[in-house]
Amino acid sequence: MNRLALLALTTLLSQASAVTITIATVNNPDMVTMQKLTPEFNKKYPDIQVKWVTLPENELRQKITLDVASGAGSFDIATVGAYEVPIWAKNGWLEPLNPLFSKNADIAKSYNLTDILPGVRGALTVGGNLYAVPFYAESSMTYYNKDLFKAAGLTMPAQPTWNQIQTFASKIHNPSKGVYGVCLRGLPGWGENMALFSTMVNTYGGRWFNPSWQAQLNTPAWKNAMTFYVNLVKKYGPPGATGNGFTENLTLMSQGKCGMWVDATVAAGFLSDPSSSKITKSVGFAKAPVGTTARGNNWYWSWNLAIPKSTKQEDAAFKFLTWATSQEYIALVARTKGTWASVPPGTRTSTYQNANYKKAAGAFSGLVLSSINTADVNKATKDPVPYTGVQYVAIPEFQALGTQVGQYLAGALSGQYTVDQALKLSQDAANKTAKDGGYQK
């Protein structure tokens, strides 16, 4: 058999033995980059074809949860948040990864699990087993436009208060020129407006439940936080704020239309990327604002890749999952984007020790790492609580409750409800959740 015939036969055999994995992921810029780099994965693993299902955050959560809980097996890799991983692991919905690392010694050696930041790895470990690996991890911080601040004669402190944010916004807000004082999440959803707003509740001294699981949403802390948020966004935010989540506000900020934006630390790289941002020279960084206490003022979150128990392509899924969260992948993103500032942050010690990353992301890398390390899911409120989580309550029922309260919050912002009406509805929903879930005794 000549070489051409042998090559043709090899190709045919490879195609015949190829497997296809389906990956469900969220439509944020980091995940879109991962999808675009699929041909690089295929260079390493030509016998594994990848099919993508990319959805907005709220829709993704609903679709994956239904699929994984029913064992339908539509996905071989699921993009899941820090909130879901421990709950799904306890439900037996996810494949433990430790046996797969033991089975694939070469991958385990090059992957180097000990390089994952200890706090991030710990959040994905249940009962000693690792159930997901982090694609990126984040906290929250304040972004501001230094050119707009200079023009208004303002100086951003390293740790602003929410009252200072309001004062700054009032001096920058100029809608006739398409400039808004502050951009904040208004889109309803437990992972959208409630991610930001829950940190405001924390830092105004509030909590979702007391240790007896009695709802606390009718307290002065919640009223102060919601009144402040509604007034701030109504007076100094962009129009149609209830339609703005992370992606929409990222676009507004990167186009120079926001004086300030309080949101995920992962946005620092996007705002520093000249291919997607017009404010690379003028973007400034500060810690997340505080209210009456510093407890819980900045959130903790990670987007992770996990293998559902229902998959029939466990080995192929493991190869993709470890490739997409490896040091090799991070370096690939830097080469592709032309800057280390755009690599997925918050996961690996080696990233923060990399001289190229320090040079490219020096303006924000220390602040990001500090924010991630200080966000404590076990001590996020001034008063004691029976749950973990900074911007969420780590119980299965919280997805529905958080989204419901997020809708009431958006209703207060749009004028559908008064703040008092929104809080009454929210309090009733929280107590019903605690009773129906068997948490109240």
Image (cartoon, rainbow, N blue to C red):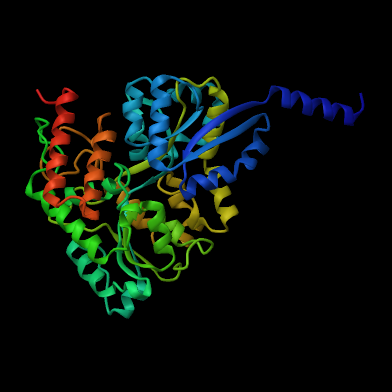
Which residue appears farthest toward the left when viewing the image? 220
Foreground residue, 223 or 386? 223
User: In what quadrant of the picture does the C terminus appear?
Assistant: top left
Which residue appears farthest toward the right when viewing the image? 2
- Examine the rendered structure and indicate whether residue 403 appears above or below residue 151: above
Residue 417 drawn at (x, y percent): 18, 50
Foreground residue, 235 or 32? 235
Asked whether residue 293 is in view, the answer is no
Q: Residue at x 29, y 73 (%)?
A: 172
User: In what quadrant of the picture does the N terminus appear?
Assistant: top right
Query: Which quadrant holds residue 402?
Result: top left
Which residue appears farthest toward the front when viewing the image? 416
Q: Residue at x 22, y 46 (%)?
A: 198
Query: Which quadrant holds residue 381?
Result: top left
Asked whether residue 410 is in view, the answer is yes
Residue 220 drawn at (x, y percent): 7, 49
